Image (spheres, coloured by chain):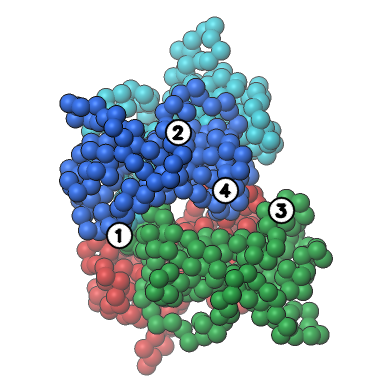
Chain colours: A blue, B cyan, C red, D green
Amino acid sequence: MQVPLKPHADSKSALQAATEPGISTSVSRLTGGSLILLDMQANETQVCVRYAETDQMGVVYYANYLVWMEVGRVEWCKAAGFNYRDMEQEDGVLLAVVEAQCRYLHPARFDDQVIVKTSVKKASSRMVHFGYEMRRAGDGRLLSTGETKHLFCGRDLKPVRLPARYYAQFGL
Amino acid sequence: MQVPLKPHADSKSALQAATEPGISTSVSRLTGGSLILLDMQANETQVCVRYAETDQMGVVYYANYLVWMEVGRVEWCKAAGFNYRDMEQEDGVLLAVVEAQCRYLHPARFDDQVIVKTSVKKASSRMVHFGYEMRRAGDGRLLSTGETKHLFCGRDLKPVRLPARYYAQFGL
Amino acid sequence: MQVPLKPHADSKSALQAATEPGISTSVSRLTGGSLILLDMQANETQVCVRYAETDQMGVVYYANYLVWMEVGRVEWCKAAGFNYRDMEQEDGVLLAVVEAQCRYLHPARFDDQVIVKTSVKKASSRMVHFGYEMRRAGDGRLLSTGETKHLFCGRDLKPVRLPARYYAQFGL
Amino acid sequence: MQVPLKPHADSKSALQAATEPGISTSVSRLTGGSLILLDMQANETQVCVRYAETDQMGVVYYANYLVWMEVGRVEWCKAAGFNYRDMEQEDGVLLAVVEAQCRYLHPARFDDQVIVKTSVKKASSRMVHFGYEMRRAGDGRLLSTGETKHLFCGRDLKPVRLPARYYAQFGL
């Protein structure tokens, strides 16, 4: 349920172009600010488009890109050295979404291999802001870009500070 | 998968506060511009949160708000005097999404009645821009706001002009 | 993702043909058995097919019928005099699915109004067995029949006995 | 939304126990019948449970197992030497579901790796009957078994005969 469209001029610069495997935190963080701009390298993971994810337009239904972003986040965590599942279970820290945005540049279709590149755009002990680029494997066609903003919360969904043991993973 | 958060200052003004049933096009359109700013009144429809829509955080999974926006759009069309289904089938005109955005202010929970208020923020013969407000029925608590931008497309997903017979419905 | 097919001969007799609004427990229960055969009247609720629920075959994706069955169960509970939500929250009793089955007779399409008729086929203090009939509103065309079997469980998903206060609702 | 339960005695024998990679058709087909019983070896594929697939019970929502079965079918086709996508696009042959069934033995949870073993139980030039076993990777715990029956259909969803070029793949 999306359409070919020329990529917005800023959609590329908004996300890191790292191609190295894994994630390494950067050195370009701003000092003295409560919110730290990161240049953390991106992690890439791949999804194969499911029939269930298409709609009668013959392409992927627009809400499903947000599911792929979730897949990207979970794999980003693993590449950063921890499991999001453990963070929830053991530390009781949840990543509650406060904002999500997606631009649809070219439709994904059933059985396409889609590479989801996920990076942290900003992080503090209170929140984290992820950026996403979704490309079709093979020809590298940019399908979609997106962003999600999250607050660290407890099981009661009230905001908490990120436990210090995760600071390094988020580049803090 | 979202969290209580103070509403953004602009989230209310971004959407019309019309409470009248049905939709009436406004008179405040800008003249001389290819893109016309509308003050079209909103249509309200209601969804009951399904168990399927929750996640293990105990609240509605964030992508499902985009599904409710789709429900809102479809009902907006009916209130405006046409069926989106017929527009696709009979005229071969599809509303392809090019951008979607959602802010999560307060979590929706299983079996909540959610009122989706949908309005057209802008429209031209090429595109339409919808705005959404999602409130919990009963106490009126604002749960979420969102926006989607669409291009009118043919069955091949290439952009087309909206047929003139739909101009009035979109306030053109 | 289903196809026109002649209804199986037994698909109709497997479900009650009650058309009365609401639910009234029957008097035809078998005595002396641990599992009681009910003739509880069915409850009907309606869903409007969402675009999200279709797939590229142009019809509703097969898994979504199970979501409609859930909608049917939740509304059955309301008609029987209690909210499933409250049973979970206040009594800590969950309806865990142990088996689900669906026959697809005729495809549902976007924007179809679908009537989901839900009835209890069997119930004991340990389990409940629901039956479903899904028909297109208007012409009454039978789209699908289904069944789900559930165990009453605690929050730890271990089997429990249904609290006595719910016996009457389930015809026990 | 499922619960620990002792596996049904017949749930294992209903599906082949092949562990070899790929698929090879068997020699045990019955002769002289229009419907041929196959002993085709199974194909295994793996899914990682998404947060989107869980519900507020803390486990995977029951309808999502049918999505995994679809993933299993698509991968079975690839292992058998063709892409289901191509069969739809190039031959206009669709696998329309006429029946689906699932038994829930043990709940799958977020981030579990689930191995979906898919096999063809029966096939003719008119229909195909798939069987599924879903196990948790690592400990091999059986989570679920299922079956789906499909008719080969054209784009108009009317039954057709499977093109002869696919006979070998389905063991015909």
Residue D129 locus on image (x, y percent): 65, 72
Q: Please name the amino acid that badge 4 sits on.
A: Gln
Chain under label 4?
A: A
Label 2 sits on residue: A17
Is the C terminus of chain C in the top left, top right, bottom left or bottom right quadrant? bottom left
Tag 2–tag 3 contact (CB < 8 Å): no
CA–CA distance between discs 1 and 3?
A: 45 Å
Residue A32 locus on image (x, y percent): 17, 26
Q: Does the image show residue B84? A: no
Label 3 sits on residue: D86
Label 4 sits on residue: A113
Residue A72 locus on image (x, y percent): 42, 46
CA–CA distance between discs 1 and 2?
A: 46 Å
Element on which disc 3 rests? helix
Q: Please name the amino acid that badge 2 sits on.
A: Ala
Tell us which disc is closer to us: 1 or 2.
2
Q: Are marks 4 and 3 on the same chain?
A: no
Chain under label 1?
A: C
Element on which disc 4 rests? strand
CA–CA distance between discs 2 and 4?
A: 19 Å
Tell us which disc is closer to us: 1 or 3.
3
N-term-proximal mark, 2 vs 4: 2
Q: Residues within 10 Å of mark 1 (few under 14, many from 20)?
A: many
Q: Nearer the viewer, residue C115 or C67?
A: C67
Tell us which disc is closer to us: 2 or 4.
2
Residue D106, picture quadrant: bottom left
Label 1 sits on residue: C85
Depicted C83 relative to depicted D118: above or below:
above
| Residue drawn at point x = 60 percent, y = 62 percent | D75
| Residue drawn at point x = 43 percent, y = 82 percent | D7
